[in-house]
Image (spheres, helix red, strand yellow):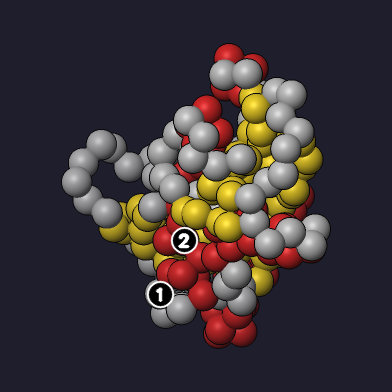
Amino acid sequence: MSDQLHIPEGLTLTLALPKGRVMETGIELLRKAGLPLTIPEKSRLLRHHFGPITLLELRNSDVPAYVDLGVADAGIVGKDVLLEAGRDIFEPLDLKYGACRLALIREKGANGPINRVASKYPHVAAQYLREKGSTAEVIKLNGNIELACLTGLADAVVDIVETGSTLKANNLEEVETIAQSSARFVVARSSLKLKRAILRPLIHRLSELV
């Protein structure tokens, strides 16, 4: 699908995408859907203009806030980030790339009680533990979360798993999958009403592509 999507005169579209691989794949998909985008060259610019379209380069975790608060009309972000953010935004499409899973992870053979869990996703971890009837403490960490298990800082961690190779190399294992994740196309609820003339056709084209 290569024909350019019609953007009615006077309408603009602001898109929020996370830096890196998700953005590059997302831009290619949006181009196929008919938006006149190109992958920005390496620069210090954080905002890029393509005619009536503005592209914002953000940290992954910031995308839901920009969309929810209407600064961006739409965006692409991982389901794991959406679950942690808890924002009230419309999620019409699973774009079916960037697949991974959120999992509870422990050292192999560990069978003692879980009193403390470390995670980059403290809200997801806390909700999961509540549903299990656990009163374990949740601490937020950044970086190599797996080290929390290896050093005794925590009895378990909640983190993203893609291939599982890092877990195997560090004598860790998945105890339970909490949620499946992949890149999602998200839309601000206010924009869905005000800019439906561009967003509805865009969502339709993306759905055909994925």
Lateral position of residue 132 relative to residue 84, left or right = right
Q: Residue furthest front?
A: 112
Quarter location, residue 196: bottom right
Residue 57 location, x and y as percent?
36, 53
Q: Return the residue nearer the eye: 73 or 204.
A: 73
Left or right position of 111 against 142: right
Q: Position of residue 192 (x, y in %)?
A: 61, 78
Say which mark, if any, is on residue 140: none
The residue that label 1 is drawn on is: 71
**Residue found 19% across the figure and 46% down from its top:** 44
Q: Residue at x 54, y 48 (%)?
A: 119
Residue type, label 2: Val
Q: How many marks?
A: 2
In the depicted structure, whether residue 171 falls above or below residue 30? above
- Determine the secondary structure under disc 1: loop
N-term mark: 1 or 2: 2
- Quick check: 143 above or below 201? above
Tell me, yes or no, if residue 175 can be seen here: yes
- The secondary structure type at the circle numbered 2 is helix
* Quadrant the N terminus occupies: top right
Lateral position of residue 103 relative to residue 51, left or right: right
Question: Does residue 155 appear to the left or right of 148 in the view shown?
Answer: right
Q: Residue at x 54, y 79 (%)?
A: 191
Reading the image, the residue beneath label 2 is: 63
Q: Position of residue 144 (x, y in %)?
A: 45, 34
Which of the 4 image quadrants contains residue 210?
Answer: top right
Amino acid type shown at disc 1: Val
Closer to the camera in the image, 20 or 123: 123
Q: CA distance from mark 1 to mark 2?
A: 10 Å
The percent position of residue 36, horizontal first and vertical second, equals 45, 51
